[in-house]
Image (tube, rainbow, N blue to C red):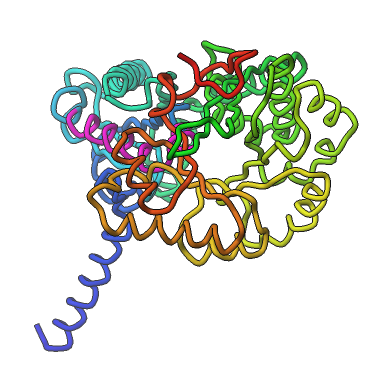
Amino acid sequence: MSEHGRDEFHRLRTSYLRLRAALRDPTTGLYAYSLRFDEIRALIGNRTRVGAIWISVGDRRLIESVYGWEVYDGLLAAAGKYFESSLDFLLPQGSILAVAGVHSDAFTLFVPSGTGGREIDAGSLAMIASALGEGLEDSLSSQDSPASDLSTEVRVGAALLTDNPFHRFERCVYRALDEARTIAERPREAERLTWLSELQRLLRSENVSSVFQPVVDLESGDTVAMEAYSRGPSNTVFALPRVMFSVGREAGVVGELDRVCRHRAIESLAGSAQTPVLFLNTTAESLMDPDWCSAEMLAALERAGLDPSKVVLDVCESEIGPDPMIYQEAIETLKSVGFKISIDDVGSGPRSSLVVEKLRPDFLKFDLTLVRGLGSDQLRRELVRSLVALAERAGAQLVAERIETVEERQSLIDCGARWGQGYLFGSEGVFPFPKGRSGETAP
């Protein structure tokens, strides 16, 4: 081979390796099926057809909304390991396993034959697909994972793939997988519509309850405020508020849902002897809701023994978006009535400093990710001190969330934090507020 030929060979090989790397999913270690067209074509060989199977983890994908992408990635990695083990005992020899795409949450399998090596048909393919789905369901259900809170059936669909000489082979693969995916997603679509319908009923009946967690002075342990948490009907997915609001966003009713939750929280305090400062979680878009300043809201606050100066609207920093100034006018209106503003899940970087500088909140809140390990991690101590300094510059009060140990409490005090909340200050962490005993924690 000439020198030019060797250079061209190495160039092509390098390009191919880069392509392989780009199409390898880092979560599962599997390649996207688009890299395996030649293997899939070879699988057909002298056969008339092969089976194409599409599998997703169903509505466990809500885990990403509720617990974050890291937890969801762990679930997908476990699913990938299950499928890899299935190649040895459940799938016919020569089957090809891939993902639908890099960072996808769906898996694809190409099966060359049915039981006993016979030509695959719709019946035998359906049996293989069903066994895979049931096996994955059992495997995921046994995982020590939040998946148990959102357990729903794995979604499986299957279609036969034939190599039509008049059609481009790659498009034949796409069509077969599209058919399999359509079959897999039909039950999910039906369930999604059911959830949307149930959410509409929930809004009409205002079937939302509230539980409360104390916010304490870290040095004295006195309850200085409480935070309200909304819950949908028990024994439903809406018992998890992040799921309830995730479905609400999809249905376009998150503003209405937020309004119901805030009114139910305030109503549940009516009759309390004395109500301390109340933190109400709200979405960023709901800051612009005129309901906050309505006569109905002010009357509800009066019945609960509250005035707006005792109510803190708690918004996650991540919801504010790239331009915090779009909320400035709404926040100024709310503050003119007396309401206070809190930025939740605040960090120590430039983004947080910008939000705080522009919106001038009354409270900053940060959680477990910074609190955990304070006693031994000097870097985290410095991060907390920087947040304390940021709050002081803004004239805001810093609140540490999810405190679990006496050591964490002391470390926070040493760093200059004054207020906190978490399991350390309540046996259940979140509990119904006891009427007539405001300012005390539940036993």
Query: Quadrant of the image for the C terminus?
Result: top left
- Left/right placement of residue 6 relative to residue 244 reads left
The answer to if 81 sits in the magenta stretch is yes
Magenta-colored span: 62-85
- Left/right placement of residue 377 relative to residue 398 reads left
Q: Main secondary structure of the magenta part?
A: helix
- Left/right placement of residue 149 relative to residue 378 reads right
Q: Nearer the viewer, residue 111 or 83?
A: 83
In this orientation, does residue 210 appear? yes
Where in the figure is residue 387, as x and y percent of width and height? Answer: 46, 57
Q: Nearer the viewer, residue 165 or 118?
A: 118
What residue is at 63 percent from the left and 35 percent from the top? Answer: 279
The answer to if 3 sits in the magenta stretch is no
Q: Judge whether 349 appears above or below 171 on screen.
A: below
Q: Hey, which residue is sitting farthest front in the picture?
A: 220
Q: Judge whether 355 appears above or below 441 on screen.
A: below
Q: Nearer the viewer, residue 86 or 311?
A: 311
What residue is at 38 percent from the left and 37 percent from the top? Answer: 72
Tell me how many marks there are: 0
Query: Quadrant of the image for the N terminus?
Result: bottom left
Q: Nearer the viewer, residue 330 or 150?
A: 330
Q: Hey, which residue is sitting farthest bottom in the picture?
A: 3
Q: Hey, which residue is sitting farthest top in the picture?
A: 235
What residue is at 54 percent from the left and 19 percent from the top? Answer: 239
Corner quadrant of residue 146: top left
